[in-house]
């Protein structure tokens, strides 16, 4: 299965998704923000990054841009519960910055697992 880096500043959501992804057979590392995620990325390779868009310190948008400057190999799923800026949805921004797919919060863990399988070309 996939090596996944899960990035979200909400501890309960981070742990809930980590548990669900591990139960689906994935190896999961977690980070509470973009800065920590970039440091984790420097220590190992991941197949998929699942990141919140709005976070303190380095947010998901900046993190996506930094990752895309270095690599197009890793798949990125951006997730957000809202936030609009000048009539443009934050998830639209994430796609334009390099996210492969987006998912709006709230969602069920099985929806995230299905999105990961689709990105990796696995049968659902």
Image: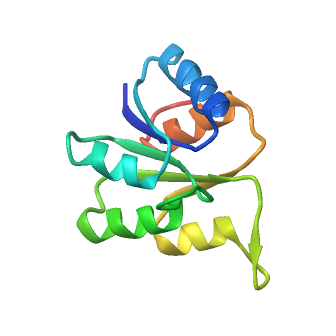
Q: Residue at x 58, y 21 (%)?
A: 20
Q: Residue at x 44, y 41 (%)?
A: 121
**Residue that extends furthest to the top in the rendered view of this protein:** 23
Please say if 30 is above or below 21.
Answer: below
Q: Residue at x 26, y 62 (%)?
A: 71
Q: Nearer the viewer, residue 33 or 77?
A: 33
Question: Image quadrant for the C terminus?
Answer: top right
The percent coordinates of residue 73 (x first, y second) are 28, 55
Q: Nearer the viewer, residue 36 or 44?
A: 36
Please say if 103 is above or below 120.
Answer: below
Question: Image quadrant for the N terminus?
Answer: top left
116 sits left or right of 38 in the view = right
65 sits left or right of 50 in the view = left
Tally the numbered discs.
Answer: 0
The percent coordinates of residue 9 (x first, y second) are 58, 44
The percent coordinates of residue 79 (x first, y second) are 63, 51
**Residue that extends furthest to the front in the rendered view of this protein:** 57
């Amino acid at each position: 299965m996939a090596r996944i880096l899960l990035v979200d500043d909400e501890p309960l959501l981070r742990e809930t998704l980590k548990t669900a992804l591990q139960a689906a057979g994935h190896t999961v590392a977690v980070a509470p923000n973009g800065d920590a995620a970039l440091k984790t990325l420097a220590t190992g390779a991941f197949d998929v990054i699942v990141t919140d868009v709005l976070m303190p310190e380095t947010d998901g948008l900046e993190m996506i841009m930094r990752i895309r400057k270095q690599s197009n190999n890793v798949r990125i799923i951006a997730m957000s519960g809202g936030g609009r800026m000048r009539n443009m949805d934050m998830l639209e921004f994430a796609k334009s910055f390099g996210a492969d797919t987006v998912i709006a919060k709230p969602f069920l863990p099985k929806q995230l697992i299905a999105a990961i399988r689709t990105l990796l070309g696995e049968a659902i």
